Amino acid sequence: MKIGLYPGCSLEGSSREYLESLQAIAPVLGLELAEVPDWNCCGASAAHSLNHKLALALPARVLALAEQAGMDKLLVPCSACLNRLSTTRAELIKNEALRREIAEVIELSLTCRTRVTDVLSVLAKATANGFSEKIRQPFARRVACYYGCYLTRPVEGAACRRTEDPQEMDALMKLAGADPIPWAFKVECCGAGLSLSRTSSVAELAGRVVEDAALRGAEAIVVACPMCHTNLDLRRSNIEQNLGTRFAMPVLYVTQVLGLALGIDERALGLHRHEVPVRWEKKANHQDTQAPSEVK
Amino acid sequence: MARIGVFICHCGENIGSTVDCAAVAKAAGELPGVVHSVDYKYMCSDPGQSMIKDAIRTQKLTGVVVGACSPRMHEPTFRRACNEAGLNPFLCEMANLREHCSWVHEKLPDTTAKAIDLVRILVEKVKRNKPLSSIKVPVTKRALVLGGGIAGIQAALDIAGAGHEVVLVERSPSIGGHMAQLSETFPTLDCSQCILTPRMVEVAQHPNITLYTYSELESLEGFIGNFKATIRKRARGVDEKLCTGCGVCTQKCPNKKIPSEFNEHLGTRPAIYVPFPQAVPNKPVIDRDRCTYYSKGKCQVCAKMCPTKAIRYDQEDELITIDIGAVVAATGFTIKGTDFFPEYGYGQYPNVITGLQFERLASASGPTLGVIRRPSDNEIPENVVFIACAGSRDSAKRLSYCSKICCMYTAKHAMLYKHKVHEGRAHVFYMDIRAGGKMYDEFVRRAIEEDQVNYIRGRVSRVFERNGKMIVKGVDTLLNGQSIEIEADLVVLATAMTAQPDAEATAQRMKISYDADHFLSEAHPKLRPVEMNTAGIFVAGACQAPKDIPETVAQASAAASKVVGLFSRSELAREPVVATVNRTAPPLFSTCVGCFLCETACPYQAIERDDIRGRDGQLIRQVAKVNQGVCQGCGTCVALCRSKAIDLQGFTNEQVFAELLAV
């Protein structure tokens, strides 16, 4: 499957392991990723709270470049980028005059022909056939799939269907041999909007997520969004300080879990870059862990 | 020579603000054959009608075209006016300048031009109209009431009480509907069963009511006064004549662990069962999907134990066809289950229940004998959270309407809980309290003030389980939007009231209209609230929209009075829009060649065969003849007739072509 890729800033900076792990598993899954040439910032957070047209023009330029490169489909792993690109596309398709105006601003032709897709959908398709044969080491752990807000919202055109209790990542985890827990914090806010301005709030909000996952015996939290990862992993010391407890529970990207199951080297998956070490005490929770019966 | 009068109505602002009515009247006045053309603000008003009547008399009009609203709205009005002035009513036609023109276009010269076109079309038609007279049809004075809840029961009793026969059809094994499941009823807290069961018995004993339970309407044919209903009486597996209702079979049935529908799955029932002890009729039904005999071929315990040998495993469904004059649709409602709410756990938590389940917990005849116990461990809950508007008024859940009864029953639930568990704490999350009704607001105040129910204005974002407690996360909008968390033992969702899952199919079977939410659509929301657009079919209860018991009973009585009014006439006048086969008197000649393609085509079996005989009585030819009582005027036969011998009265080929050529 040939597909365009828009990494966005996070995947080249604080979350480079997301990109590394995605690129590591892509060839095994038969994914051919081609980066959008000369891409720019999607404008997330900053632009759309200040200037609506700017907030449209930035993602529109990325869409136009992808179009120019002949990409039918564009994979956007970062949830914030995904939100900006897909809402921009939807709005420009709906409003013909606006599309022409924005095309003029970015000085590129723009038909919005390129479709925008998320990492869970792409992985679901790529693992649909013959994935179990590729598994070297089932990721036999209890995991808490954490979707955050942008994968289920806005509801129209969202990557996941059941807004309040999405299942797409859970299904991927089962394929990798993991045991996803049922829990109520899948789409709770991690506090990303306040990540820089009010870290105390982030510690509180992200803390609730980590606390509940731990309470239910999860051995790892799995995410598909750089902001979620930053708040649950990088801010872990703030969380622990706030709650007065320590949680030895790593936060992995969905691509990293698949990579581990496929037997890819930990370094290639960027596990060493995490703040919370990706390690488990030997077989400590093994009784709770169900055998990977559903690997098929 | 035709002398046509044209009358253009402004319909207040409705037409007048978009269409230049004076210009339309002026243009119409210049059409050939038009001798009189005027416009007026409200043509349907008394002075408007007088203008038409005066013109007919003074101008000696031979035809009238009224350019106004839809003929559905006022054709009867204007035709009556013409009749009063001595003009055959079928020489009056309406050009729809409102729905077909002013309401759907902007104020542009083209809009007025279209209005003129519409009028010209009808002028050309009316020139070719012929005087017709209404067809008289008899009325079968027997009503079909569909649904045996409180709406159907009330309608049936009222019609039967007026001396007419009623056939009451209920699809579950007993009549009683949702009202039989309720514990106490607001705002007086009288016991639901105590007020309902005497009515149920009355239905069973009434000499004018024929009751078919465990039965469904298979098909409905015909028209007002002359319907033919086919009812599928499903096989109970029990000979109702022999069964005495002793209950031995239900006690001895070894398969007792089936979730009880009547108890909203909080209790169990055997495979042969009566839904509840006060059921009418008190005759059991075998649930063939769960009965061991049907799945494994063995058991037959009920047959062995039955003292009157009434068990019939091989009983088959029975189809009963009945002539009916009017129908009351009282097919009821259902509610959303807890599994509809992902944010409240998708139905995975046993201690998150629906309001109807709470009714069963509070009911003396329920699975806990009226003691409030939570389903997970049968403990008495100390902290109960009630969530109003669960699904209702939420367009994101595609349920934008208010379920209307929840504010009241939630107050009642909280009150009942406090009456039974004095130390318990009851919390209600609400959006607004809609307690419009006699003694309703007083009832809610009583819950808040006397029973100290904690009302919190705000929504609940999530309910989940932690350490055996249900964590309810919500917001108090009166406390500055502060988020709050309550550890509850039991959560009761006032889930949205919805149409029956098969409401659409039922409506289509009866050829009646329904809305986007699949509630049945009354003919007019204000002025014809119990009639359907299909003549002879009436509506009562929550199948039309969410409503409470008093409102349902009132509507059922209203529907019954409409039926009784219809039955007070011995015959009805029908529009003469029926097909006719041309015959020239003496009844010898017809262009019909007797191919009888029309007979095959007619969906209503209205084509009969007629002999044309010579003076000597010898058969010359067999030709088609239309039974005008059965014909629905669909025109299929007209399209198929290859010798053009059939025409539709009021819509002849000549008239329709004249209309088309005038465009």
Image (cartoon, rainbow, N blue to C red):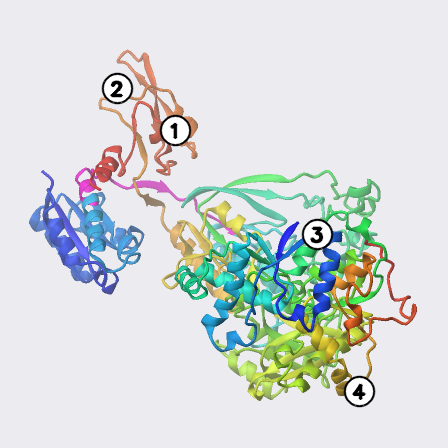
In the rendered image, residue B563, in percent from the top left (x then y), is placed at: 42, 53
Mark drawn on residue A244:
4
Residue of label 2: B588
In the rendered image, residue B491, in percent from the top left (x then y), is placed at: 69, 74
Q: Relative to the observer, which residue lies in front, B563 or A179?
A: A179
Q: Nearer the viewer, mark 3 or mark 1?
A: 3
Q: Is residue B126 magenta?
A: yes
Quarter in which the N terminus of chain B is drawn: top left
Secondary structure under the numbered disc 3 in the rendered image:
helix
Q: Nearer the viewer, mark 3 or mark 4?
A: 3
Q: Is the residue under label 4 in contact with that under label 3 (CB below 8 Å)? A: no
Q: Disc 2: which chain?
A: B
In the displayed structure image, the side of residue A37 where residue B26 appears, left or right: left
Residue of label 3: A126
Q: Relative to the observer, which residue lies in front, B194 or B555?
A: B555
Q: CA distance from mark 3 to mark 4?
A: 42 Å
